[in-house]
Structures are given as C-alpha cells and as structure tokens.
Amino acid sequence: MRPNHFVHPPTSVIFEQGDRGFYLSGCLCLNCGTARFSDINILVYAPLSTRLQRIMDRDGLTRADAYARIRRQWPDTRKQNLADYLVVNDGYKPLEPQLAEVLATLTM
C-alpha cells in the first residue's frame, strides 16, 4: 500500500455514476496521478492563509507545523497547471455559483 492510504484514508478516491457520466472525487487525485484518467480535472483551491488556519483549527497544530505539512505537498502552481477548472474555497467566495459555472460548461 502507498503511504497516502495510511495518511489520508478518509480522502480515498470515490467513483460514482451521475446523470452526466462517471466522476471521481478525491483530494489527492492530482498528486497520485489518477487525474490522467480523467477527461476534466477540477481543483478546489484555498489560499495558503486559509489552509493554514483550517489545519491549525482542525488538527490543533502550531502554525509552523501546519506550514511544514503544506510544504510537503505539491506547490499550488503545479496542481493549478494540471487543472482544467479552478474553484476557490476561501470562505468568502460562494462555492455554488462557481461549481454551477463549471458544470454549465461541461458537455458529456
């Protein structure tokens, strides 16, 4: 088993069938290479400051430890370059209109 299966068990990839075909959901799809099997990749992105605060709140980490965790991940630009669409999840910009806009452009 790869280390991510131990570190991120709740984020395992889920394949589902919807009205417009199959989709897969998993926060590590780009990092693990499964995105290459997708026709379209949507990256849900949060700015660094937002991610730091969420990690500290959720896991009780110090800012330094939360930052160290983020630094072990792919750089944002690398993930963004692989994504066809970017949805910003910063707690201010509503998600629903962004997702509706992405879905409206998809034709399957």
Image (cartoon, rainbow, N blue to C red):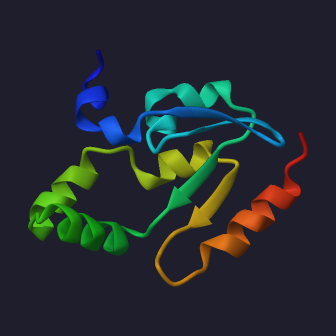
At 69% from the left edge and 54% from the top edge, which residue is drawn? 85
Q: Outermost residue, bottom direction? A: 92
Where is 20 relative to 90, above or below?
above
Q: How many marks?
A: 0
At 55% from the left edge and 27% from the top edge, which residue is drawn? 34
Where is 20 relative to 87, above or below?
above
Residue 33: % across, % down: 51, 27
Quarter of the C terminus within the rendering: top right
At 61% from the left edge and 72% from the top edge, which residue is drawn? 95
At 18% from the left edge and 60% from the top edge, which residue is drawn? 66
Q: Outermost residue, top direction? A: 1
75 displayed left or right of 55: right
Q: Quadrant of residue 5?
A: top left
Residue 3: % across, % down: 25, 25
Quarter of the N terminus within the rendering: top left
Q: Quadrant of residue 9?
A: top left
Residue 39: % across, % down: 75, 33
Residue 32: % across, % down: 44, 29
53 displayed left or right of 81: left
Q: Nearer the viewer, residue 85 or 106?
A: 106
